[in-house]
Amino acid sequence: MTYKQKKNIMSKTIFITGASKGFGKIWVESFLKRGHRVAATSRNINALGDLAKKYSENFLPLQLDITNRSEVIEMINKANSHFGSLDVVINNAGYGLFGAIEELAEQDTKDVINANILGTLWVTQAALPIFRKQRSGHIIQLSSVLGLWSLPTLGIYSATKFAVEGLSDALAQEVAGLGIHVTLVEPNGYNTEFGGSSAVGSQSIADYDQVKASMGSGEGLQPDDYGDPEATADAINLLIDSKNPPLRFFLGKVGLPKTTRIYAERLAEWNSWSEVAKAAQGKPASTINL
């Protein structure tokens, strides 16, 4: 069943970060077209001017630096006060830092951690008191397939998404009895600005040039593997309308088959060392066969 086949969709209030371009702006416009109320944040809300004119009654653009915790709390509360409700919070803001691990600069690394991990944490923390009080709410975290496995030159970005996965897995267990849902959305590559104007690059070390050159021929990185971001809108709308949303949810065709293969390889490797692992519990070392 597609979203377009659903009838009598209940209007919700949605707070979304990183809304000025890419997934964020596509989803905001989709939400507004379907009659939802949307508070959308960006560092530069000028890019949201067209939507503000078209959907003035149901749309609240907010300028926000998600790394500023007090500002995040203020904007979440402002959205809740403005619309009189808060139902869904989507942590979409974030960006990529490209470079081999050795190449990563200190400040660039701190900045991407602040945005991708701490920004997500601050928004989540700001929403939770409201959701706990009303005993309902849905927190949607934009993770990535790179929160499940890594690619060379995207190690620090992947590390931030692994962190969001761990944080959100724990959160889901903490709030399960409070009527609050948590979903990790894990897209594969899409034709957005992730690798373009939104990205930050490191200083290059020649020894890693061959690794970088081979990236384009990797699994899941062929031109046909990149999805159309416009095609994600129905999936996200189905997700926010679900009464029992999943904890983890792939976007695109690459995530499930590649993750299935990689996790099978991991299980095989763990099993091949299982006797050594059990011996480390306290079994005499003399019985280990390497």
Image: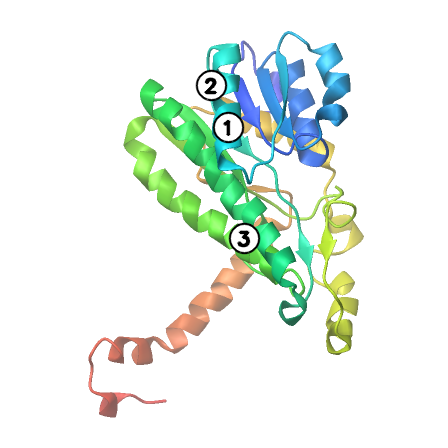
Say whether marks 2 and 1 touch (CB < 8 Å).
yes
Residue with the mark numbered 2? 86
Which element carries disc 2, helix, strand or loop? Answer: loop
Near-viewer residue (287 or 181): 181
Query: Residue 17, image x and y in percent?
Result: 59, 32
- The colour scheme used here is rainbow
- Which sits earlier in the primary sequence, circle 2 or circle 3? 2
Q: Residue at x 70, y 32 (%)?
A: 231
Q: Mark 1: give few (<14), some (14-19) or many (20+) Cα within 10 Å.
A: many
C-alpha gap between disc 1 and disc 3? 19 Å
Query: Residue 212, image x and y in percent?
Result: 75, 67
Near-viewer residue (255 or 196): 196
Quadrant where the N terminus lies? top right
C-alpha gap between disc 2 and disc 3? 27 Å
Query: Residue 30, image x and y in percent?
Result: 67, 21
Residue with the mark numbered 3? 160
Mark seen at residue 23: none
Which element carries disc 3, helix, strand or loop? Answer: helix
Residue 148 visible in image: no
Is 118 displayed left or right of 208 in the figure?
Answer: left
- Which sits earlier in the primary sequence, circle 1 or circle 3? 1
Three-letter amino acid code at the position of disc 1: Val
